[in-house]
Image (cartoon, rainbow, N blue to C red):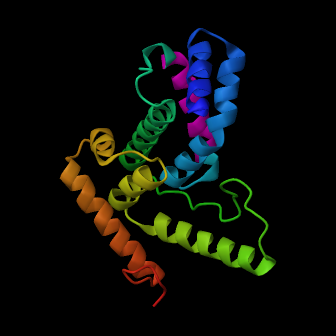
């Protein structure tokens, strides 16, 4: 709860024009925003550009932020909305998605593990990223928004202009396709 109160105070300071507070928000959430954008856009370079644009938009619209909702949820919603717009422009322009950089790092440094466990984990993450990138947009985008962006089905439906039931169906099918591609059974173990 203390983290939530400290975060709320930080957001209020940033809303008041405190540049240091906004820089701290960027420091706290920047990596996760870049990660979400990378998963949605399929490219580390595009993710960096998108994250920069997201934080510019957030800075401009902080006055409209409703403190009644969690700041991270609002921030990730802004990021997801921006990435969906980028994807729509790409589709409209007829461009193909860039391949994801398999050497890109993600997430915080893990606990001390054996080199073998680290290698296997890294291999599994690359395999998962490749399978996720290979999904059609209609499956990849809602799945990424749900599990990486931590948006609810209702929020995803609103972002994509779909019904909640349609979002649930797309996520279910995306999971089925990932299981099939990765050779994982419904119980989660390799076949």
Of 135 and 67, the residue lying toward us: 67
Left or right, 72 with respect to 159, comes to right
Which stretch is magenta? 46-61
Where residue 108 appears, as percent x and y from the top left, is 70, 53
Image quadrant containing the C terminus: bottom left
Left or right, 154 with respect to 80, comes to left
Instruction: Give the image quarter of residue 1.
Output: top right
- Name the residue rendered at 32%, 57% in the picture: 138
Q: Dominant secondary structure of the magenta stretch?
A: helix
- Name the residue rendered at 70%, 58% in the picture: 105
Of 50 and 33, the residue lying toward us: 33
Is residue 116 rendered magenta in the image? no
Where residue 159 appears, as percent x and y from the top left, is 33, 39
Q: Residue furthest top?
A: 16
User: How many labels sit on residues?
Assistant: 0
Is residue 49 rendered magenta in the image? yes
Instruction: Give the image quarter of residue 174.
Output: bottom left
- Name the residue rendered at 56%, 13% in the picture: 15
Residue 144 versus residue 24 in the image, above or below: below
- Name the residue rendered at 44%, 41% in the picture: 80
Instruction: Give the image quarter of residue 123.
Output: bottom right
Where residue 129 appears, as percent x and y from the top left, is 55, 66
């Amino acid at each position: 709860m203390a983290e939530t109160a400290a975060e709320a105070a930080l957001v209020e300071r940033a809303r008041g024009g405190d540049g240091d507070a906004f820089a701290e928000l960027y420091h706290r959430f920047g990596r996760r925003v870049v990660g979400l954008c990378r998963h949605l856009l399929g490219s580390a370079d595009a993710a960096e550009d998108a994250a920069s644009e997201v934080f510019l938009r957030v800075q401009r619209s902080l006055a409209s932020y409703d403190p009644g909702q969690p700041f991270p949820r609002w921030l990730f919603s802004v990021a997801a909305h921006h990435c969906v717009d980028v994807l729509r422009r790409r589709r409209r322009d007829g461009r193909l998605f860039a391949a994801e950089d398999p050497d890109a790092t993600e997430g915080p440094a893990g606990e001390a593990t054996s080199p073998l466990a680290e290698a296997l984990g890294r291999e599994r993450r690359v395999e998962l990223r490749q399978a996720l990138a290979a999904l059609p947009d209609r499956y990849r985008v809602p799945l990424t928004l749900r599990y990486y962006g931590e948006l609810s089905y209702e929020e995803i439906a609103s972002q994509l202009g779909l019904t909640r039931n349609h979002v649930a169906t797309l996520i279910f099918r995306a999971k089925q396709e990932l299981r099939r591609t990765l050779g994982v059974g419904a119980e989660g173990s390799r076949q």
